[in-house]
Amino acid sequence: MENSNNPQLNKLSPDQGAENKSPVINDIPSVSKLPAEIEKHKFWENPTFLFVCMGILTIIAMLSTYFIAQKYDNPMVVIASISLVTGIITLVGGMTIKTIDELATTNRMKTEFVSIASHQLRTPLSIIKWYVEFLSKKEIQKNFTDKEIKYIKTINDSNQRMIKLVNDLLDISRIENGRMQIKLEKTNFVELCQNIIKENQPIAELKKIKISFKYDPSIPLILADPKRIGIAMDNLITNAVKYIQSDKGQGQISIEISNKNKNIIFNISDNGVGIPAGDQKKIFKKFFRANNTMRLQTSGTGLGLFIAKAIIESHKGSIWFVSKENEGTTFYFTLPLGKK
Ligand SMILES: Nc1ncnc2c1ncn2[C@@H]1O[C@H](COP(=O)(O)OP(=O)(O)OP(=O)(O)O)[C@@H](O)[C@H]1O
Ligand SMILES: [Mg+2]
């Protein structure tokens, strides 16, 4: 892979990103449930775990009160102490379990709410999109002033951003509910990638960014969900374009698809702002945005990589990156070739 403006980045190998590598999880339905489950219950918040701890604590309390009471030779002190300690432990344990249960219910309601609200927003947004597209037609715009044309473009850009956000939120609630459906079909991965590059080309051209694309011609068709893999790929390409500063020299993006060890390897390398070392561990977290990109005031919600990771892992693949601040970033993902 060539990245003439960024020799440092070319030296980075996929292995150097090992610490940023996401674990491969093989079971498709449980993968999509995973983020929500992790958020809902850490293992020490599990009711069974709490009951076992309460039991152990009760036994320890009973034994210590028994030995203390024996020392003072008073059976009433034993009974009173055991009842008091057991009562306190049961009360605290019960309250903790109730709180966890309430939190889990609130979390479920929140996910449901986001899902319903996003669905409801889709209809009015589609209507706005339809009218804006109509108003953007050349034959309609010939009657408009320059100012009016500019306003329509601004409405269009904002509406597109809202549509993306609503779609992202819907994807997130599907992932969290374990309802992200993967429809596997024979997919031409190279063609899919070419189409997505084409869609990103206009913005890249506006920023004078050069996109190069290389692929191994022997890559076979793979079993994948083209719509979902397309979303993951688009998130990575959009990021590469977005996080290159056009006023800092020639922007360069290199995309390569290779075929190694029964896996397809996709990598995208840019000479953009890079990800600060301190932020790298959190980059796949929902709503997380690195400090440097926040400072640059680029638009974004911090959902793209979270969704991309869930999609790739639901295909039994793996995603990771190598990055240096002010030098650039390379994202990698693999997909198993599987049966054709
Ligand atoms: N190629 C890249 N170069 C530099 N930083 C990146 C790159 N890709 C991702 N990042 C960092 O990771 C963060 C999370 O990326 P992610 O795609 O999830 O969200 P986003 O781009 O901020 O918003 P959106 O939800 O619209 O995609 C970004 O905000 C940015 O800080
Ligand atoms: Mg993004």
Image: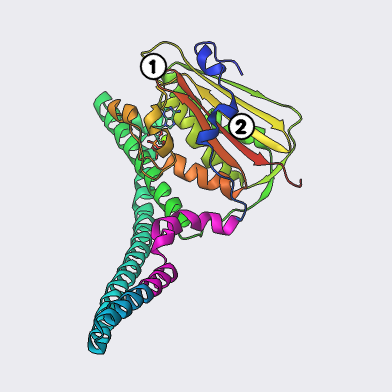
Q: In the rendering, at what x and y percent does residue 37 appear?
A: 45, 59
> Along the horizontal axis of the image, is 243 left or right of 312?
left
142 inside magenta stretch: no
Quadrant of the snapshot with the C terminus: top right
Q: Which residue matches tag 2?
A: 266
Residue at 28% of width from left, 79% of height from top?
Answer: 71
Q: In the rendering, at what x and y percent does residue 171 appear?
A: 45, 51
Mark yes or no: residue 228 visible. no
User: Looking at the rendered structure, which numbered label has been put on residue 246?
Assistant: 1
Dot in front, 2 or 1: 2
Q: CA distance from mark 2 to mark 1?
A: 25 Å
Tell me where residue 76 sits by quadrant.
Answer: bottom left
Tell me where residue 274 sits by quadrant.
Answer: top left
Kindly identify the amino acid type of the residue bearing the numbered disc 1. Ser
- Given residues 337 and 95, the one toward you in this image is 95
Q: In the rendering, at what x and y percent does residue 206 appear?
A: 42, 20
Q: Is residue 165 above or below residue 85?
A: above
Q: Which residues are magenta?
A: 28-57
The prevailing secondary structure element of the residues shown in magenta is helix
